[in-house]
Image (tube, grey):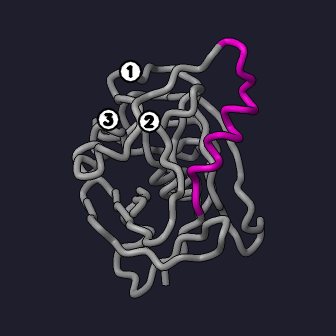
Amino acid sequence: FPSHDTAAHVVDGSSKVEVVLVEGPREASIVEIDSKNDLAILRVKGSDHPAAPLAASRDVKLGQPVFTIGFPNTDIQGASPKFTRGEISSVSGIRDEPTQWQISVPVQNGNSGSPLFDESGNVVGIVVSKLNAFETAKNTGDLIQNVNYAVKNAYLFPMLEKFSDKLEGPKRRRFFKKFESVVEDSKKSVVLILAY
């Protein structure tokens, strides 16, 4: 049974959850929810979908390039995966929250739960939110741009311990491997999650 991780707010309170794989939608069950850190683990029966390798949070540095692949605004942008990239802007989240990264990777509604990858294709976090530009403008008079957050892997690893036999260790990018190939490989482990 492959497992997939996502943001808790994507699936919490849903009566039905589906994961869209290459072979079509499959019903998923919620294995575990960590509402405090906004993480969830889903299980999908009858699929051998590949898992992305995970890197330790302690190896992630300020300024490090990162990217995400997700499914924002599917009703407008469509259901094909969307790629965006940026950097680790801060090693802590809003108000110095230690469980999160601040990232400059552009995200939209629907990116929540998307994996945050390093340049080698290792997951370093899960995208969970963005700073509300309109609320910030009301309070500060400044229109904040591209301030987004991802939960660090350090808070995901404990939830995945029971699946440790299925998890891959971190990969190192070979100097001859093009970045586009890393993105293509990473895309294979990303799925659209539908919660009803």
Q: Which residue is mark 2?
A: 124
Between 31 and 164, the one lying in front of the other is 164
Q: Position of residue 82 (x, y in %)?
A: 71, 52
Q: For the point 66% across and 36% down, which residue is it?
A: 85
Mark sitting earlier along the chain (2/3)? 3
Q: Is residue 65 above or below residue 167?
A: above
SS of the residue at dot 1?
helix
Image depth: mark 3 or mark 1 in front: 1
**How would you rate the neighbour count of disc 3 (Cα within 10 Å): few for under 14, some for 14-19, many for 20 or more?**
few
Q: For the point 27% across and 64% down, which residue is it?
A: 33
The magenta span reads 175-191
Q: Which mark is residue 22?
A: none
Image depth: mark 2 or mark 3 in front: 2
Mark 1–mark 2 distance (CA, rounded to whole Å): 9 Å
Q: Is residue 21 above or below residue 190?
A: below
Q: Which residue is mark 1?
A: 59
Amino acid type of the residue that numbered disc 2 sits on in the rendered structure = Val
In the picture, the quarter occupied by the N terminus is bottom left
Q: Which residue is mark 3?
A: 96
Between 63 and 33, the one lying in front of the other is 33
Q: For the point 53% across and 20% down, which residue is it?
A: 172
SS of the residue at dot 3?
helix
Q: Are marks 1 and 2 in contact (CB under 8 Å)?
A: yes
Mark 2–mark 3 distance (CA, rounded to whole Å): 18 Å
On the image, which quarter does residue 4 sit in? bottom left
SS of the residue at dot 2?
strand
Mark sitting earlier along the chain (3/1)? 1
Mark 3–mark 1 distance (CA, rounded to whole Å): 19 Å
Amino acid type of the residue that numbered disc 1 sits on in the rendered structure = Asp
Q: Position of residue 68 (x, y in %)?
A: 60, 43
Q: Position of residue 159 (x, y in %)?
A: 25, 52
Amino acid type of the residue that numbered disc 3 sits on in the rendered structure = Asp
